[in-house]
Image (spheres, rainbow, N blue to C red):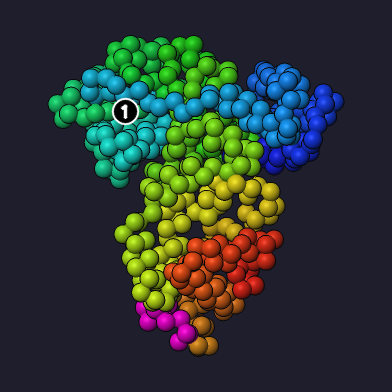
Amino acid sequence: MFDNLSERLTSSLDRVRGRAKLTEDNIKDVLREVRMALLEADVALPVVKDFINSVKERAVGTEVTRSLSPGQVFLKIVKQELESVMGQENDELNLRATPPAIILLAGLQGAGKTTSAGKLAKYLKERQKKSVAVVSADVYRPAAIKQLETLANDIGVDFVPSDTSQKPIDIANGAIEYAKKSHKDVLIVDTAGRLAIDEDMMTEIKALHGAINPVETLFVVDAMTGQDAANTAKAFGDVLPLTGVILTKTDGDARGGAALSVRHITGKPIKFLGVGEKSEALEPFYPDRLASRILGMGDMLSLIEQAEQKIDKDKAEKLAGKMKKGKSFDLEDFREQLQQMKNMGGMTSMLDKLPGMGQLGDIQDKVNDKMFVQMEALINSMTPAERRNPDVINGSRKKRISAGAGLQVQDLNRLLKQHKQMQKMMKKFSSKGGMKKMMRGMSGMMPGGGGMPGGGNFPKF
């Protein structure tokens, strides 16, 4: 998300970043470009107008002119105003209620409500250690009930059965009784997709809301609909007392207009972002972190949190112990590192959160997740003995391994070369003063910086 906007904004703001002095004229030129970038990102016009006016008002005032580094202060103002548009800070779920705390999901057809119900259940179970039950009140689509049941089983939360012959209010009340008896902390109620103009359906969900009195009423909306997402959320907000928004399919939205428009137009906070199809692909929405990513400053906090949650600490300690004992970093270890990166959302997800990545041009083309999938396929095609001792891999073995992975011998040669470079780097890391040596070795890893340590480049599968 925000790929196009980030590229446009960073190139525009680079023009003032190092200025010793800013004038109303050169600020005006940059703001014109920022305005165009926001409009192209499908940000709602009222949001763009207010944003530009706020930045201009602060930028041409004493806040910038009295500063020793006006360009940096201007960038800071833009970041702060972006945060302001999106809601300043993360707005957590309010689960302070007599159990079960009820969360009602509403939204349009196809927005991803049922998938979001499953993701939210997993988030609450694993990240907040809550006992969760889910129920579907979508009596118009039997497939939705079955889908939620499948998700609940996969995630390991309780599914309360329902069928199309029941009324939504009866389904919800029955689920509440079940959640009370089984001492659940949270009950998530999925509802039927509806159109804002469908009065009967809107009346139905309003009655359902009144009957169960949820602590959170979340509107689920597709980010790819751009500023229409904000307008639809407002239409629902006029009928329901919404407490927040879940923005789905943000991984497929390069513009980001919805994220920058929803809070301003609806007055309701975005609480979560859906960032992929997997059940764990739901992230709390942090306006400050997202503003940093938009401006090419990265999001190290999210990356660190992701590492803490996803990296297998036992395996990491085992590898560290192995290195300390002077043992070689073999292809089994290399495969383990590839799998750890995959658990963290893949290389592209990690690069997106690193500062300055947006300014490295075609890095996403050179370092992509397909490349790592193919590397893992090559390692899987080897025997355990070959993985532990790659030096035994001769010409005939290379042909067998490459054919087994459906790739070429030159692809395997690149992998073996990269493994050798990684091996040297890990050796430096485990030696005295290893961190400094390793960082020096890594300095050439990114495209444009000399390739991998030792002169090799990322393999071009």
Q: Is residue 245 above or below residue 442?
A: above
Q: Which residues are magenta?
A: 382-393
Q: Secondary structure at mark 1?
A: strand
Q: Is residue 84 left or right of residue 270?
A: right
User: What is the three-letter code of the residue carrying label 1?
Assistant: Ile
In the rendered picture of this protein, how many numbered marks are placed on residues?
1
For the point 53% across and 55% down, which residue is it? Answer: 347
Q: Is residue 380 above or below residue 229?
A: below
Where, quadrant-wise, is the N terminus in this rendering? top right
Q: Is residue 314 left or right of residue 298?
A: left
Q: Is residue 55 above or below residue 379?
A: above
Dot 1 crowding, Cα within 10 Å, few <14, some 14–19, many 20+: many
Q: Quadrant of residue 254?
A: top right
List the single residue furthest toward the left: 181
Label 1 sits on residue: 188
- Residue 409 within the segment the image draws in magenta: no
The rendered magenta stretch, by its main secondary structure, is classed as helix
Q: Position of residue 280 (x, y in %)?
A: 39, 43
Q: Position of residue 424 (x, y in %)?
A: 51, 74
For the point 52% across and 45% down, which residue is it? Answer: 300
User: From this viewpoint, is residue 269 visible?
Assistant: yes
For the point 33% across and 65% down, which residue is it? Answer: 318
Q: Quadrant of residue 116?
A: top left
Q: Position of residue 297 (x, y in %)?
A: 61, 42
- Residue 387 within the segment the image draws in magenta: yes
For the point 35% across and 15% down, which residue is it? Answer: 209
Q: Position of residue 408 (x, y in %)?
A: 57, 76
List the single residue furthest toward the right: 25
343 or 173: nearer the eye?
A: 343
